Amino acid sequence: MNVSEVKRLAEAIRHEVRRAIVGQDEAVELMLIALFSSGHILLEGPPGTAKTFLAQCFARTLGLDFGRIQFTPDLMPGDILGSNLFNFQTSQFTLTRGPIFCELLLADEINRTPPKTQAALLEAMQERSVTIDGETHRLPPRFMVIATQNPIEQQGVYPLPEAQLDRFLFKHRMGYPSAEEEMRIVAVHGARFGAPRAEEWGITRQVEPGQLDEAVTATAAVPMVDEVTDYVVRLVRATREAPDLEAGASPRAAAMLAGAARARAALDGRDYVIPDDVKALAPAVLRHRVLLSAAAEIEGRPVEAVIGRLIEEVGAPR
């Protein structure tokens, strides 16, 4: 598969998702980039902005084995990973697999569960494997996590630790739709009751078996010239020296930004990366990997403004 075929595949996925989802084009684009660069994505937004429904439609379009976990304060790690249960008929322990054993996992309201349970996802997201009672079990190679969280509620939530946030390729903030989009949402969905379901909208699989692996391989092969690589490194290192930031992004952030830029180029049908790919993705890659300084927080400077200024200050290659 070449980048032109990757572009056509992405266009088919977009078109199918838009049959049920109104707006949220940026979220769909970032989910596609995360998919083709083997990353995970965290969607943050108020209730009712179609975060869960979007993940369901995305999984159905890809034909992936879909799993969903509704995170709650009483959820335990074993509820996610599974456990070994003793079978009295065979006098042996057998593994009862948890919902994490799937290809695309929706971690719904991930900030509602305590850190101990949140940490159960760490190995799965990084290594694509889980360890139960000392035995390692492999997850599918295309395993992907789409997590959601609600930024409004302050009670009964547990902020994700920085170590786990760093596992997410993107953090995307889903806002409310425009007035025109909301009119379309009400016109299309207003006559239905209950939570929408992807199958009710006739969404069909657009990715044949093996195509996703080929697309990921083609994406990883997109070359990046030294000038763009240097730009990625300088941009990430600038976050560690910015006075408005107490902590900057890690080398993992630089590697992930480079991989995401390759995926964006492939989705555009290009076999080369340009600085605009890096600029466009830098906010979503960096916003959850940096910490504002105390002075910046007191003065009310948002992290997006700080990152935006760094992007302007760090010169891009011409």
Image (cartoon, rainbow, N blue to C red):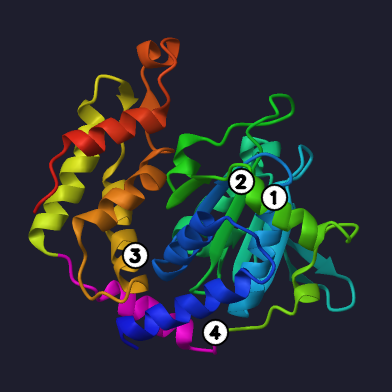
Secondary structure under badge 4?
loop
Estimate the x, y position of residue 267 in percent, counting from the top left: 37, 72
Instruction: Give the residue at mark 4.
Output: 207
Check disc 1 and give the amino acid type. Answer: Glu
Instruction: Give the residue at mark 2.
Output: 178
In space, the residues marked 2 and 3 are separated at their CA atoms by: 25 Å
Dot 2 or dot 4, earlier in sequence = 2
Asked if the residues shown at circle 1 and circle 2 are in contact, with their CB atoms under 8 angstroms apart, the answer is yes
The part of the chain drawn in magenta is 207-224
Instruction: Give the residue at mark 3.
Output: 264
Instruction: Give the residue at mark 1.
Output: 182
Q: Is residue 201 above or below residue 237?
A: below
Check disc 3 and give the amino acid type. Answer: Arg
Secondary structure under badge 2?
loop
Which mark is in front, 2 or 3? Answer: 2
Query: Which residue is at a point 31% across and 76% down the rendered structure image?
Result: 269
Estimate the x, y position of residue 223 in percent, counting from the top left: 18, 71
Check disc 2 and give the amino acid type. Answer: Ser
Q: Nearer the viewer, residue 168 or 208?
A: 208
